Image (cartoon, coloured by chain):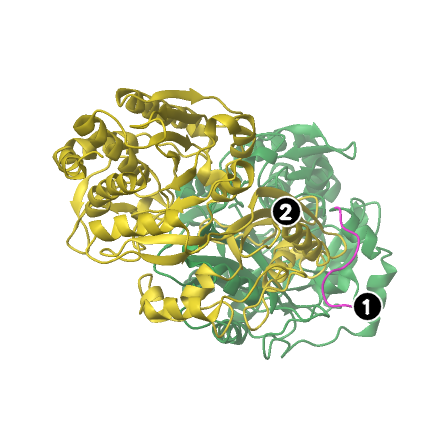
Chain colours: A yellow, B green
Amino acid sequence: MPDVNAVLEKADGNLDAGIERLFELIRIPSISTDPAHAGDCHRAGEWLVQELRSLGFDADLRETTGHPMVVAHHAGAAPDAPHALFYGHYDVQPVDPLELWETDPFMPELRTGATGRKVVTGRGSADDKGQLMTFVEACRAYKEAEGGLPCRVTILFEGEEESGSPSLKPFLDANAEELKADFAMVCDTNMWDADTPALSAGLRGLVGEEITVTAADRDLHSGYFGGAAANPIHVLAKVLADLHDETGRITVPGFYDGVEETPDDVKASWTALGKSDADFLGEVGLSKPSGETGRSALELTWARPTAEVNGIHGGYTGEGFKTVIAAEASAKVSFRLVGTQDPVAVRASFREFVEARIPDDCSVRFSKHGGSGAIQLPYDSPLLTKAKEALSDEWPNPAVMIGMGGSIPIVGDFQKKLGMDSLLVGFGLSDDRIHSPNEKYELTSFQRGIRSWIRILHALA
Amino acid sequence: MPDVNAVLEKADGNLDAGIERLFELIRIPSISTDPAHAGDCHRAGEWLVQELRSLGFDADLRETTGHPMVVAHHAGAAPDAPHALFYGHYDVQPVDPLELWETDPFMPELRTGATGRKVVTGRGSADDKGQLMTFVEACRAYKEAEGGLPCRVTILFEGEEESGSPSLKPFLDANAEELKADFAMVCDTNMWDADTPALSAGLRGLVGEEITVTAADRDLHSGYFGGAAANPIHVLAKVLADLHDETGRITVPGFYDGVEETPDDVKASWTALGKSDADFLGEVGLSKPSGETGRSALELTWARPTAEVNGIHGGYTGEGFKTVIAAEASAKVSFRLVGTQDPVAVRASFREFVEARIPDDCSVRFSKHGGSGAIQLPYDSPLLTKAKEALSDEWPNPAVMIGMGGSIPIVGDFQKKLGMDSLLVGFGLSDDRIHSPNEKYELTSFQRGIRSWIRILHALA
């Protein structure tokens, strides 16, 4: 067995250089949803290939119909060492509204954050460039301290996670043999708090739909036509208002098929975490859960499905006023799924729900964005148990098992297509402002994250 | 009495040069709602001052806190000639979406339109630059044929009509003595059809409100917070969906105070015009009235109040998808008023209506845009009767008395502040696409419009 302490020391000695490497990656504005940044996505992938080659990985950039994949392989210390597939994504969210950023989103800085702790600033600092680099730096420390890795490692970095991962399933299908490992490790999740690491046993699925309601064949003057002409914003508002009933329950027929109540003992363990609704929501300026009544914020975000309007647009929205009846109005709607809710059935039922509310003289068209079911891992698997111990050795507090409200569709695909369970470990914090202006990643997350992977690889080897 | 036929001949001879003058005015992009075009608004006013001075008017540009007024005076043929105040506006609507224009909105052309008739293209060609120039060109023909005007004429052109006319009331108050005349003439309305001129006896009022709903103190990730955090788009959609009941009636308390049913004989005269709902709405790709059930499209747009959402915006609306819960969402809402509906009361009741629907953790702020009551002129006034005869002499079909769905707040101000009735005569057509891409003005509207004012001035002198 390698000497884990020597590897940990090597990692600490590499920290300053590791931060500079992370900065290099953040400086590449790899916004996957914006076609104008396709070249930057390519550049980010290429940067990672070079980085992994320098660590002895057999690494390549693999083209897709979208942004390329990074695939890299490294042998383990022994022929029978376990084989881990590590997954992360090098693409990032858009940065608007840009005027709310206190630093340039693509010029990272090491700053003292609001809580007095050091943070790395920038878009992707947490989601997911900072997170994936914890693993790369862990590999570097092993390489430099021990000359190699204790486990056999395959790495898969994609560049379309923030835009629905359209190329991922075809890529997994086409490269199943190459990518299959004993288990997967995914680093795109949060800690419980700054001192307490967490393992996620469940992940919500996601269905995205863009709906566009059209009425007249042009924008109309609201004086000449108002009162007689159909207004697509009114139609859209009615559809969206109908999505929830007065108890916050989603009204799309059949939506709750496959949703089971969370077992009482699981709910009790969440209550024991001691985070009240006011604590959870207070971090973002809110105080009361707004979803299904009678459920805690943790249950609502970890174990209940949702329907959220992520964007809406129609008519004149510039400065001043324009008395216009718009020709069309559109909204982006996403559903978070739990249990065995079927993304295909949810999408179909939602489309019927909308179509039933489109009056004469109006029409609707739909555009599909992503679709993946939820996933639930067993709480007592050996993989989770060993990783939990390794994490508990590194951090001030023992690791806790939590739920996860976000969707990481890859985890479902790993299970369905490659038969692998996934270890969901991440070092983000809930105030990292991912997807928002002023995203940051704690320096502690980065440093102890690297050390955590060193310990986990050691424990699993 | 001057020889009206000589004046009409002079006008016809001037037509080509008059079109070129109109082009010059359209080429000035005087978009009043956009601060970036303030200089252009000033330039349009200055252009009109020079034009009127060349016709012997005592004309000036008068600064306001917004865009300037054009005020001009010309004596009549006799000391006791009636005194008319002519009103128009030189500002125009924004041009977005620009990509839908077939011509440059500020590079007017004389083209053959969809119906085979010649049209002038460009933003403002109809609303209101083409219309106000019919009167200016009528004055030119009188000046050149007769050496002067048959009536005493004061001209008032404003530059803020498309953005709520904030400077107009203070300007009327401050210059009441100078602007007061025997009656006003306003050229900002439509013909009944291409062969049938119309006089408008009623005008709807207008109240505009922008509402912004806020929730969390930042944009949130819909995975981490979805289901527990308030979504301001949902709140806004509910408010807007609640504005109308299932019969299309507006639900704001007290909204219908001051709204009277249209007399049966008036409704019968509208039915006699022979324009079905399908005719009215078919011009814009619609077929059925969508407002209060059981009323015709003409009644809905001429004699009933409305609530219309003119714009809505919230969350991510760019390409692709962003799983965000927005921090705020906003909508621009306007009400068209009839009868004696009080704009102040309507605004206050609407704000209460909205506030009652804002849940815990959310707040709302309001921004006021314009506010004016409706106006109704007597159908049998001598002013209307003489003008109706003059119009009937010029056009293929006799003139008709109609209602008007749009709002021209100045007409109410003329009545309230200066004690003047207004003659509402205009030569626009319902397919002129005002406020929309590809606005145009029929060459016939321009030519016969000029000739119509010559006849009206002659009849009133």
Q: Which residue is mark 1?
A: B267
Question: Quick one: A152 or B144, which is closer to the camera?
Answer: A152
Q: Is residue B111 left or right of residue B58?
A: right
**Does residue B148 show up?**
no
Which quarter of the picture shows residue B366?
Answer: bottom left
Which quarter of the picture shows residue A53?
Answer: top left
Q: Is residue B253 left or right of residue B283?
A: left
The secondary structure that dominates the magenta segment is loop
Give the mark toward the camera: 2 or 1. 2
Contact (CB < 8 A) between labels 2 and 1? no
Three-letter amino acid code of the residue under disc 2? Asp
Please tell me whether residue B166 is drawn above or below residue B246 in the rendered image.
above
Q: Position of residue B195 (x, y in %)?
A: 81, 45
- In the image, which residues are magenta? B285-293
Which quarter of the rendering shows the C terminus of chain A?
top left
As drawn, the label of residue B454 is none
Q: Are marks 2 and 1 on the same chain?
A: no
Q: Is residue B436 left or right of residue A392?
A: right
Q: Which residue is mark 2?
A: A219
